[in-house]
Amino acid sequence: MAVDESGQAFTHPLYNVMAQLPGVSLGLTTADQLLTWGASNSLFVFPMATSCCGIEFMAAACGRFDLDQMGTIARGTPRQCDVMVIAGTITVKMAPRVKKLWDQMPEPKWAIAMGSCAISGDFYRDIYSVVPGVDTFMPVDVYVPGCPPNPDQLFAGMRRLQEKIRMRRNGEWTEPELRPETFGFKSPNLPRIGDPRREASLDEAQLDAVINLDPGGGLRRPDPKGSL
Amino acid sequence: MTVPDDVTRLLAERFGLESGDPITVSRDRVVELGGALKEAGFTYLVYVACAHYPATDAEPDRTVAEYRVRRLPVDEVAFRVWVPTGESTPTLVPVFAGCDWQEREQFDLVGTIFAGHPDLRRIMLPEDWEGHPLRRDYDIATRHHPWR
Ligand code: SF4
């Protein structure tokens, strides 16, 4: 059984025919395992490092800890990357940019929320300009808690992601992961991605904001209140 | 920091102002004072800072803009202007070019309006933001759809 991008199990019609032929099923299984092994061991990361957690990410990527040893090489463009590591506080102004970069990454892709700021906004979550968790606008696969998480914890997160990729490819993991509800928010509690209470209009509004983002800065839409 | 003697003299003779840290100056003379200080050697602008003061019995709702300038290596002078809400203070960009982005930032966060500023747009918050968040009357739970 294979699993598509949305986590649904599917079987190609040819698969059943081919699986009857001698030796084919063995070959398919082996190829699938080989692909999964390759995918989980060459995770190119896109470091979305916006604040102090970014420094810890850099420490993890440097000689003493050496993130490269598990095939996670940092690239500067979303188009070459498999994993986005969101390391730092995401502000309201940054959020559409992060979502745009996420949308530019090719499938299959995964996201790691590193640090309490990316997970829930941390102690900035009630500040006027901070997004209360990146999973309010993009799906997150692994949460790495800490303020900041030290490099070992990031390594544990990467290992967890590798494990999760293998389990998903083997069809052992189908349900989306939801982080526990955070209580005591003063800020608006946006339903997270994958939450049944989340309305489609919110997704549409976020996508609309991303599409209307002007690369030169500013909005393409005319300012409703005029300048000043 | 003590105000240097030549600045105290300049303030008394030309502006009729008391020296102090900071010096309080009226809105119609702030550009002149900035120019005079620059001529006296204070060429380095350290910061522009604003704060909001809600209305009291004695005073209307107002903001204060403070400029701090430095004469290298040691002398520093700060001067401030009071700006009632809804009115503006002249910009100091023609005197200190470094004021440009700092005044934009103060406009963005506190809402002080600098008249004659070449490009008074928001600099830190998103372009479609409403209100000025560092004002005392700003509601911290204001929503910014669709991100929070
Ligand atoms: S979680 Fe802590 S270390 Fe990480 S970005 Fe937030 S404040 Fe900084």
Image (cartoon, helix red, strand yellow):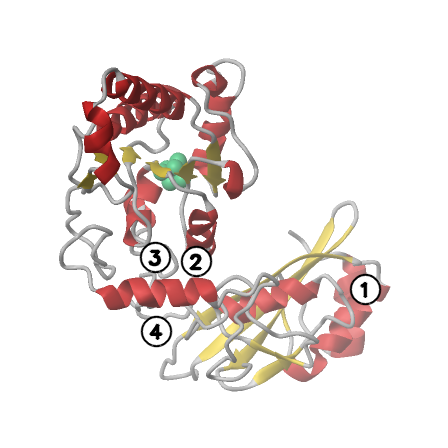
Kindly indicate whether the residue at mark 4 contacts the one at mark 1 (C-beta within 8 angstroms).
Answer: no
- Same-subunit check for callouts 1 and 2: no
Whole-angstrom CA distance, mark 3 to mark 4, is 15 Å
- Report the side of A24 relative to A58 (left or right): left
Residue B137 numbered tag: 4
The numbered mark 1 sits on a residue in which chain?
B
Residue A12 visible = no
Q: Tag 1's secondary structure?
A: helix
Residue A96: which disc? 2
Instruction: Kindly tell me whether residue B77 is visible in this rendering.
Output: yes
Q: Is residue A147 left or right of residue A184?
A: right
Residue at 29% across, 56% down: A126
Mark before the other along the chain sequence, 1 or 4 = 1
Q: Residues within 10 Å of mark 1 (few under 14, many from 20)?
A: some
- What residue would you read off at disc 1? B38
**What residue lies at 55% left-to-right and 86% top-to-bottom?**
B87
Q: Chain of mark 3?
A: A
Going by the image, does B69 lie left or right of B22?
A: right
Give the distance between the C-alpha atoms of the residues marked 1 and 4, in whole angstroms: 36 Å
Residue B45 to residue A163: above or below: below
Q: Viewer-nearest of labels 1 and 4?
A: 4
- Image coordinates for residue B22, horizontal then vertical, percent: 61, 63
Q: Could you confirm whether marks 1 and 4 are on the same chain?
A: yes
Say which element carries label 3. Answer: loop
Report the amino acid beneath label 2. Pro
Separation of residues labelled 1 and 2 (CA atoms): 43 Å
SS of the residue under disc 4: loop
Badge number at residue A127: 3
Say which mark, if any, is on residue B50.
Answer: none
Q: Position of residue A83 (x, y in %)?
A: 41, 35
